[in-house]
Image: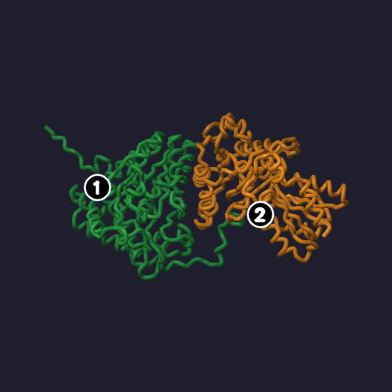
Amino acid sequence: MAEMNILEAIRSAMDEEMERDDRVMVLGEDVGKKGGVFGATDGLFAKYGEKRVLDTPLTEGMIAGAAAGAAIYGLRPIAEMQFADFVYPAFNQIVSEISRMRYRSNGTFGLPMVIRMPYGGGVHGALYHSQSNEAYFTSTVGLKVVAPGTPADAKGLLKASVRDPDPVMFFEHKKTYRLFKADVPDGDHLVPIGSAEVARPGKDLSIFCYGYMRTCALEAAETLAREDGVEAEVVDLRTLRPLDRATVLGSVERTGKALVVHEANRFGGFGAEVAATIAQDGFEHLDGPVTRLAGPEVPGVPYHHDLEEWFMIGPAKIVDAARALAAY
Amino acid sequence: MAETQAQPRHAELGLTDQDVLDMYRAMLLARAVDERMWLMQRAGKIAFIISGQGHEGAQVATTWPLRRNHDWLAPYYRSIASAITFGMTAEDIITAHLAKGDDVSSGGRQMPGHYGGAPYNIVSLSSPVGTQVLHAVGIAMGAWARGEDVVALTSYGEGTANQGEVHEAMNFAGVHRLPVIFVCENNGYAISVPLEKQVGGLSVAARAQGYGFPGVTVDGDDPLACYAAAKEAHERGRRGDGPTLIEARVVRLTSHSSDDDQRRYRDPAEVEALKQQDPLVGFGRQLRELGVLTDELDQQLRAEAKAEINEASRRAEARPEPDVSAAERHVYADGEA
């Protein structure tokens, strides 16, 4: 076991996959000598050179589209969007091309590629460096969407994503990059895409979360246990698409109550899909309204510290929402 | 004393008599396929078609230098002749237009005109214009990164040349001198909007200078001129000297598509005059002047193209329809053999 933070885990995953398979390459803005604006690719340029760690112009459409072409050619590109907020020029490539390529070619062209994107707020990034825009991608058939919350999952899921035959959108909550260190198993550590994890067992209600919300939900669960005697089960979805329905529904069967938490705004958010799944297929086990706790309905995270605090979901808001649901 | 005789034009380009006849044959076949598509559309067998008539000379000639099953093609919706030159058969194309279940492009999932075929190194095409240009650049990037001797060619119209992704693609290809050939088939119209309302400066080729690689304008009705430009571009790519933009000035002999009527926005006299620029007519005349083609041989080649499209259509129509129970397959690779 090695202790590392999420950023180190991501870097380690890319390094190991590049070493294992010379078809794996990294491309994006400032990923080369600088090692990425967050340092995710630090050291890879020196180790693998420009032809495998490629600084691109500021052209997100090109990053996604050329990665798709490279995947057609037989490579395994890992494309980095510097911030998830800047992915929109690449939206045409991701939605029109990358997600549909296998289906539209009747299975003859697959795109084994990963698009990594730092997302989320809480880092004074305001409207355009804080977005949680996963719902655009979870609603796009043909993509897989992953959002890890621990170093071990970040590493294991990224390695699995690189090896996956289909395109994976890999969401990295930037607030978690250096938030904490934790054990990551040694060796070729893989976490399968499509598998959620019960991060904390409980009997009174289930909290469904992903990314940074895992940390917040676990902290909230400790408070609930200590102050209220409420035992919350925390389920880290880890993969948003495909959703691990069995683990979600199994948890609801145990607890009878579901709180779905995410930082993105509520309306049409990914939580709606989780909530609907529970409402439809877990109905007989429910002992309270399926509840969503989500970011406010404003177009982005406002900048001033107080405004950002108002926006962000943290342990206190989760405790409040869980108390109301537990009391139902 | 022996006199040095100037070589015929095609021989100077390294093309044999047989080569130019094969190019002509490909153009005839593409035209025969195209005309059959219109017939089938009018007969109600195909819902929609989009034509390449007038583009055949440029398409055959620019694709000709590529190595089949080695280089790559990222075509567009008019690329019938390019696809044929790169290995697709008339039967493949008619099968795709009839949306049959074993259509090599999409198994009946895509509309007509969405060429593609993994067995031929032809990238599957979508409908938003210009996206394929980045795929060609990505293929070229892959070849460059791997140090492999592969060239990608992508084609598109002058309307598409204005898309942001095309700019992004050319800029990136220029930065790394990637082995890619951009072929802009400029027929003067983006559906109904004429060149002067689309392209500031009126030249697509001139834009290449800003990206740091050569841009050349060629007469798209002159296949040998197109071939010369493409051959040089292919060699440039293979040498590691980077991309080339070829703007082939072609004519669009038909309406944009079967849903369009160009009489609404083009002068009938202009459309009539275009027929004088039909590359099939021009190339046939050129080959006669070169002493390669006779009237008799021309008749024979046209009869062969007609026989081929008849047979291709007959076989395509007999192919199975898509299996609706398999409509959810190939969304992801999971569970696939």
Determine whether B318 is above or below B216 in the image. Answer: below
Q: In this view, does B22 lie to the left or right of B110?
A: left
Q: Which residue is drawn at 30% across and 63% down?
A: B307
For marks 2 and 1, give the one nearer the viewer.
2
The colour of chain A is orange
What residue do we see at 37% from left, 38% from top? B208
Q: Which of A74 and A129 is in front in this view?
A: A129
User: Whole-percent x and y of residue B117?
Assistant: 45, 54
The amino acid beneath tag 2 is Phe
Q: Relative to B299, is A51 above or below? A: above
Q: Colour of chain B?
A: green
Locate the N terminus of chain B by quadrant: top left
Q: Position of residue B101 (x, y in %)?
A: 48, 64
Left or right position of B135 against A33 = left
Provide the chain ID for the residue under circle 1. Answer: B
Circle 2 residue? A270
Q: Residue under circle 1?
A: B17
